[in-house]
Amino acid sequence: MYSLTITNPNSEPLQIKLTSGKMVIGRAVTSDIVINDTAASRRHAEIFYDSITEMVTINDLKSSNGTYVNRQKITRLFRLQNGDVIRIGQTVMHLTKITNTTTDQKGITGTRVFTRELVLEAVDEHPIPLNEITEKLNNVVDFDSAISLVIDLIKRTMGVDVCEITLAQNFNKINMEDADNLMARAIRNSSVEASPLALCVPVISGEKPFALIYLERNRPGARPFDKREMQLAVGISHQTALTMQRIELLERIRREGQVKQLLLRFVSPIEAEDVLKDYLKTGNLPDLAEKKVTVLFVEIADSTGFAERIGPKKFSSFLNAFYQYTTQVVFKNGGMVKYLGDGVLAVFIEAKDQLGPEERAAMVARDIIEFVKKVNPPEPDRAWVVGVAINTGNAMVGYVGTQERAEFNVMGNLIKMTYRMQEYAIPNRIFVGASTAEAIRNKYLVQKAGNLAMRGSDQPIQVYEVSYVKTAPFVQSDKDGEMSAAFKAIAEKLKALGK
């Protein structure tokens, strides 16, 4: 006795026992074997089974698209043998001789090492369903969708009752000590494990395991898995591995692009590439860590007043130009940027083949002030005014937050001190701390500006002004820590500007 196992990418497998005599195969509902395939003719082929001689033959009935046996198009009556494969369109029919031996009833069992040869054999035996599965998987771009689609395809093409996919990161939930556990054996041995009604296939690309596919038939009277179904499962697992590998690569590219865009908010493109390389090695952005840095803070004076007087559109236009220019000049000099309302905080760190961070900060300060002076004033009697402060010392520098929402941050008393110094650097002046002044005094004219009292500190801080042309020196602060006359004059200007 013979049976035909009919498979089609769009329906579950169907097994039909051949009856003695002729059976018409076609798309017409009146056919003995109806196949739902657009490539099939209404009366496509005729199969004949002689139960006495147990001979099976097939003949094409002048169909439009032909009948194929073992990949060869038949043009005349053809005698079939056990194991032959008939194809009509995308419908594949496997001829199997049914016996009552214990081996046939048991189905396929045991272990098969998951090798390249096993995959090639699977692809060679099941080109049509695997091609259909590949086309569907090519449109998937995330793991959840891939798993859901593979489960649906396996249930439909193999007619299984249970299909479970366990990702590699969840392998630890499987009892690896259980010698009878198909899943545990498949993981340990990178092998296909089969029992009569269960099949376990690893999803592997190269030597990297992605997942494990577990199949089971548990309905009453279910037939055991045979060799061809094992091959199909191997083929599907291979296509699944390729899909997961592609998704992993796409996710990596997406994540790299996301991190790069994040970094470009704070550092120059060249430095962004360097930080990205470290991120790809470690999987993390640099955490907050104490470093010696030179920080520069610049802020637009009376920004709120200007916005109210000239309107949001004009103010926004200048603010954007100010941010853009400041960012470019900071990046050009190897600094990092953090935007703070109507001000910009730049951070400079010692770098190979570059000028010292203090000197680079001083160059940036000069360029920013020159830029502001050249910008057309929004009001006839009021020009744009900024103040710049530079300080050198230890601060906490790094990224905080998640990878998707990380922010570059700089924290510590050094930053508070620099903010405070900047308040007195108006109009268009550059004030620096003692460490910065010492580092740049051989290239810039640096003069004492006075002592600045800091909230929460008993000791005043010596402040210096950087000039590019010689000017009269400031009067230093009195011993009691009061601001010098120069600082008092600047404070009055701040009040007039509405700070």
Image (cartoon, rainbow, N blue to C red):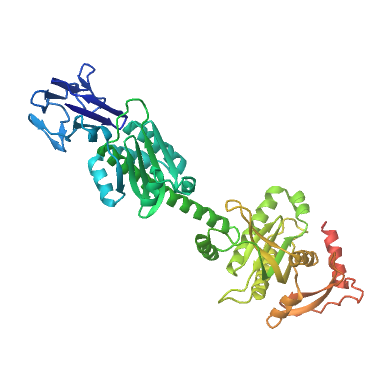
Residue at the far right in the pictured view: 480
| Residue 380, x across and y down, in percent | 75, 57
Which quadrant does the N terminus fall into?
top left
Tell me which residue sits at (46%, 46%) in the image.
Answer: 175
Relative height, residue 457 to residue 40 (above, below): below
Whether residue 300 sits left or right of residue 481 in the image: it is left
| Residue 452, x across and y down, in percent | 84, 70
Q: Quadrant of residue 19 in the image?
A: top left
| Residue 277, x across and y down, in percent | 50, 63
Residue at the far bottom in the pictured view: 442
Residue nearer the viewer, 366 or 348: 348
| Residue 147, x across and y down, in percent | 43, 40
Residue nearer the viewer, 491 or 346: 346
Which quadrant does the C terminus fall into?
bottom right
Tell me which residue sits at (40%, 33%) in the image.
Answer: 162
Tell me which residue sits at (27%, 31%) in the image.
Answer: 7
Whether residue 193 sits left or right of residue 409 in the image: it is left
Q: How many marks?
A: 0
Residue 14 shows in the view = yes
Residue nearer the viewer, 337 or 89: 89
Relative height, residue 467 to residue 22 (above, below): below
Whether residue 322 sits left or right of residue 141 in the image: it is right
Residue nearer the viewer, 389 or 97: 97
